[in-house]
Image: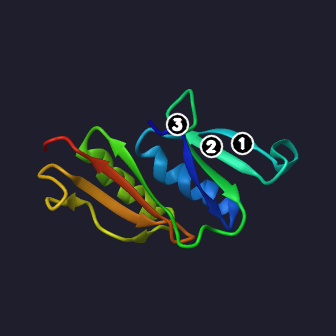
Amino acid sequence: MIDHTGVIVSDFEGAKAFYSAALSAIGYQLLAEFPAAVTGHTDVAGFGAPPKPDFWISRGSPNKPPIHVAFRVDARERVDAFYRAAMAAGGRDNGRPGLRAHYHPNYYAAFVLDPDGHNIEAVCHEAG
């Protein structure tokens, strides 16, 4: 079981704003933030459903190639809300909300590229 993951971003403040807006649609919040003085390396910010962050961003040179992270949600409406929020926050379309039946009959997802090109997905595996 994965405990946490994350991406490296070029514009830390801009990425915090993007992820705060995009992930709020799926119930995530900015839950923790530590400066380089604390981490000994770089600034980091953690997002998640309270009480624990499980998705982190770090200031630095973005991952090359960009990373793909998928967030599982419990309703298709949350996939739609994620897509709208991410696009409004400056994301780029990488796959509008819809069924991806080639994965399985109920795979409903949306894909957005964050400002650094990371492929961020919201996916629901439940029937309509």
Q: Which residue is at a point 14% across and 59% down the rendered structure image?
A: 101
Mark 2 sits on what residue? 46
The vertical placement of 35 against 115, above or below, is above
Contact between marks 1 and 2 (CB within 8 A): the answer is yes
Looking at the image, the residue that sits furthest to the top is: 51
Is 112 left or right of 32, judged from the image as shown?
A: left
Cα–Cα span, label 1 and label 3: 17 Å
Question: Where is mark 3, residue-wise?
Answer: 3
Q: Residue at position x 79%, y 54% from top?
A: 42
Could you say which is closer to the camera, residue 2 or residue 93? 2
- The image quarter containing residue 103 is bottom left
Mark 1 residue crowding within 10 angstroms, few (<14) / some (14–19) / many (20+): some
Of circles 1 and 3, the one toward us is 3
Precedes in sequence: disc 1 or disc 3 = 3
* Placement of the C terminus among the 4 image quadrants: top left
The x and y percentages for residue 113 are: 45, 68
Left or right: where 66 falls relative to 9: left
Which residue, given by chain and number where applicable, does mark 1 sit on? Answer: 33
Secondary structure under tag 3 reads: loop
Indicate the quadrant where residue 26 lies.
Answer: top left
